[in-house]
Amino acid sequence: MPQNNQTLLEKTVADQWQTLPSGLTVLVRPMPGYSSTHVIYATKFGSIDRDFCLNGQTVHLPAGVAHFLEHKMFEDEDGDAFAKYAKTGANANAFTSFDRTCYLFTATQQLDESLDVLLGMVGHPYFTEQTIAKEQGIIGQEIKMYDDSPDWRLITGLFECLYHSHPIRSDIAGTVESIAEITPAMLYDSCKAFYAPGNMVLAAAGNTTMEQILAACKRHGLMESRPAQKVQRLWASEPMTLAATEKTLTMPVSKPCFGVGFKEEPLPADDLRTEALYDLVLSCIVGGMSPLYRRLYDEGLVNPGFGGEVLRVDGCCCILFTGESDVPDTVRQLLLDEIARVRAAGVDREVFTLCKNEKYGQLIENLENVEDSASQMADFALSGQTVAQQISMLAGLTAEDADAALQHILCTDRMATMYIQPDGTAQAAEEDEEEEG
Amino acid sequence: MERTLIAPGVHLSCDPASKFNRCRISIHFAFPAERKTATAHALLPLVMERGYADCPDMTRLTKKLAKLYGADLTVDARPMGCNHNLCVSVTGIKDAFALEGEALTAEYTKIALGAAFHPYFVDGCFDPQAVSIEKQMLKKGLEDEINDKRIYCLHQANREFFGDSPAGVRQEGYLEEVDGLTPAMLTAAYRQMLRTANIELLVLGCDAAQTAAIRDALLAELACIDRAPLPLVENMAMPAIAPVHKTENYDMVQAKLCMLFTLGQPMQPQQLAAVRLAMALYGGSVTSRLFLNVRERDHLCYYCSSSFQSFTGSMAVNSGVEHADAVRAEQAILKELADLCTGPITDEEFEDCRRGLLSGMNGVEDSLGGIESWYYIEVLRAGANSAAPIQSPEQARNALRAVTKDEVRNILRRLTLSVSYLLTKEDAAHAAE
């Protein structure tokens, strides 16, 4: 690589990183020439964190608490955080995934004030029976919205097949019934356990500096040490067997949707290398450069959205293939044949190298805008890594590593299949429409 | 952003955008949508994106892009009111990030121009095999529309709303026509586009020399074509009518409601700032009446938002509601509009909305996508209304700062409900009766 390019790359991926006395990890990437700043305040607390021991006391949460807490965090005794953001002009949001909750905003003015809203709302939780009851209606609507999504139902159906007891079986938002069990005490316990600064990351990218972010942290007491909470996540044992090999449901869809899932050994929390390797293996098997993808596409056996993904969280790692097909069993067999072929022959060396090229380009792309840049920093930091380490790690992956991984992943004895069959109403509507025409 | 006329019906817009890690070359073809060629024009991007004369094989093309560090070639089509827009774009990391010192931008140029002007032809027409495969993909896409009920509800409402008007042409294609398309029909549609489209070359993130090279390469391509660009169709609006209510029944967990309103007359360019603020107040932000009252206070839905389509002078309100609450939700949505038209608007909510919009506009030029979307919509607005200037984000911010409550009310008062489209469970519909 030319020297000047190396320097540019190092400059581009560089971020500033500090761990404050409170335990909070702060990452900043100043981006000269940008008007916006994107800030993410993230905690390692997601929908799978259902059982834990807090200062010697066992806590069990119903499904959906992390997501419910995310909604409630926007409200305190002074009112709604969105109303406070409205005074700064910042565009704020939040989301909850299986293993994290993130609060974020983008601002082009009054950054200090927006930081105060963010750090204030997350640092001063406020819950009552009344405010909880109020939120149950809105979240119930959100749950129902996802219930109508075939893509989401496919994924959750696969988790129910692959896992006996791991909390990934439950929807991130929970159910109408489970969120009805939520109490203020559960939310306060969750905050005490998982919203401690030592469990959190604050990442900012754009028109800002480390000094500005640290000043905000200081205003909110995050420069002072905090008494550590003793928190231990509790996991039920999860065997490597399947809960079910197959599941089918019907929905108003036009064509059958299907998913094939493989249960894999869980990965250590800081092992991003293996996750990246699995991802490259999938690209070699079903990615756009693979012979299987081309055959499925040209023969019209799947929709263009067919593909594979690796999902890993604490205590769970699985590989999922999802798509839509008139002949899902044929596609599944072609997939299994291709896995067996590549396992025996080794991954295509040219394709493997090209996939690495693509990943490198993606990492550079993600440093370009303030949202992706802050998100990427926060994501890696929650696993204790930096973007620069990711680029080095990627460069070190070899086709031989992929061949070795393939010997023990994607095994049929740990495979489950999920089908969504049309209930017939979607086709009926089409026919009606044609008659009218 | 600099914009210059480089040939009749052809403009170059460029921005060196040095702060970005990537560059982007886009060639936009805009032309009036026609019913008879709508399905061919919907199929065209799928076939063009598969490959071109110098790289006809889809897999080889994917590998070529991967070698360029995952550069992206996209050919997509979008409806713009009564006009159709096909865009060929290549986006990739700048030469400075190439690990082996490759001249990436020159490669991006070849790919973009190759995909746009040198399709892979067999006997003078698009490759029959590629056409056959992509027809199946188009059919799948059209059949899949119903899987996402929110989008399906919006499309159905639009079909009812626009009917046989030029804006009602289904630019995504007509399912029943796909099988009958031939390579010759597709080739004719492609040639028609090259001949009649208004072309906008957008070059972002390239230096002056690279931009000049791209411009010259495009002009060389156009020199081989007998060009006769057509004027774009002017902004339109559907006339106000008595509201039409339609219901479809599916076994869904949550009902979807889409309400379409018309301004009754085409939106004028000088109304744009007031329209933006009107949407932020009514249903386009988290401080809007629909969000705060219909969702947060009344808990009638998880989402309830409004958006305005300037090319067609129409407003859509989309919401996901409990089956049993659909009628109540519709009434609440109408009441919020009426309250804004006739009731008080506090200074606080007005300024909160304005502040949020101004802040968002400040950040438009912080992403390649943001810059391209902003300017290309502005270009189309100008193309569809000769009185419309191309506004920079700064000019738009100044216009927004000057908007008054009365101007916002004047916009909202013109909006009348034309279509209310509901997807719901059968038993819920019976219960409502």
Image (tube, grey):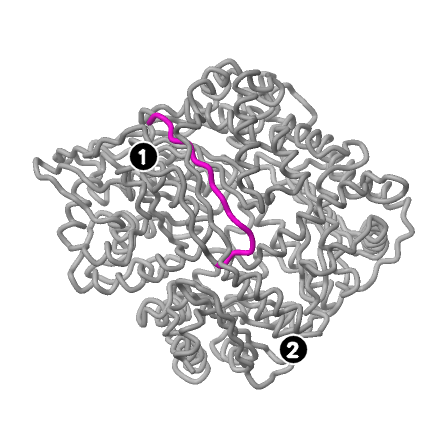
Identified by mark 2, the residue type is Met
* Quadrant into which the C terminus of chain A falls: bottom right
Please state the horizontal and vertical placement of residue A222, each as a whole percent of the image. Answer: 22, 39
- Residue in the picture at 74% in, 43% down: B48
Residue highlighted by disc 2: B238
Give yes or no for residue A263 being in the magenta stretch. Answer: yes
Give A239 or A346, whichever is nearer the viewer: A239
Query: Magenta region: which residues?
Result: A252-266
Please state the horizontal and vertical placement of residue B194, each as a whole percent of the image. Answer: 83, 51
| Residue A26, numbered label | 1
Residue B71 is left or right of residue A80, and the answer is right
- Residue in the picture at 46% in, 26% down: A278
Identified by mark 1, the residue type is Val
- Residue in the picture at 41% in, 49% down: A153
Cα–Cα span, label 1 and label 2: 53 Å
| Residue A424, numbered label | none
Residue B257 is left or right of residue A337, and the answer is left
For mark 1, give the secondary structure. strand
* Quadrant into which the N terminus of chain A falls: top right
